[in-house]
Amino acid sequence: MSMSTINRAVKRATREVQLSRFKRGVADGLFRGVADDSDLAVHLANDSEFYYKNGYDFGVSLYCELEEDQ
């Protein structure tokens, strides 16, 4: 296996984890309205707080927009 193949695989795995953290944040913000402390602790430990927090903020924004429309 070449180094470029390994590098592509690592980058892809990293993007998948980042997207997963973002989506978890969106779900918590939109459906729960509160951040999941256990998720946040895991994200902080994994240095992916940025993606979770941005997803959470986006989810809360969506929730607020839905509330305004009703």
Image: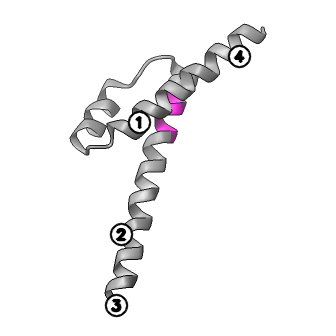
Q: Give the range drawn in magenta.
A: 23-28
Measured in 3D between alpha carbons, the distance from the residue under mark 1 to the one under mark 2, in whole angstroms, is 20 Å
What's the mark number on residue 66?
A: 4
Residue 47 shown in magenta: no
For this orientation, the residue located farthest to the left is: 45
Q: Which of marks 3 and 2 is nearer the N terminus?
A: 3
Q: Which of marks 1 and 2 is nearer the N terminus?
A: 2
Badge 2 marks a residue whose secondary structure is helix
Q: Which of marks 4 and 1 is nearer the N terminus?
A: 1
Which quadrant: the C terminus?
Answer: top right
The residue carrying mark 3 is: 2
Q: Earlier in the sequence, mark 1 or mark 3?
A: 3
Badge 3 marks a residue whose secondary structure is loop
In the rendered image, residue 9, in percent from the top left (x then y), is placed at 40, 74
In the rendered image, which quarter is residue 7 located in?
A: bottom left
Instruction: Judge by depth and name the residue closer to the eye, 59 or 38.
Output: 59
Q: Earlier in the sequence, mark 4 or mark 2?
A: 2
Answer above or below: position of 20 versus 33.
below
The reply to whether dot 3 and dot 4 touch (C-beta < 8 Å) is no
For this orientation, the residue located farthest to the bottom is: 1
Which quadrant: the N terminus?
Answer: bottom left
The reply to whether dot 1 and dot 3 touch (C-beta < 8 Å) is no
In the rendered image, which quarter is residue 61 located in?
A: top right
What's the mark number on residue 10?
A: 2
Amino acid, disc 3? Ser
Amino acid, disc 4? Leu
Does residue 51 appear left or right of residue 62 in this picture? left
Measured in 3D between alpha carbons, the distance from the residue under mark 3 to the one under mark 4, in whole angstroms, is 49 Å
The reply to whether dot 4 and dot 1 touch (C-beta < 8 Å) is no
Amino acid, disc 2? Val
What's the mark number on residue 52?
A: 1
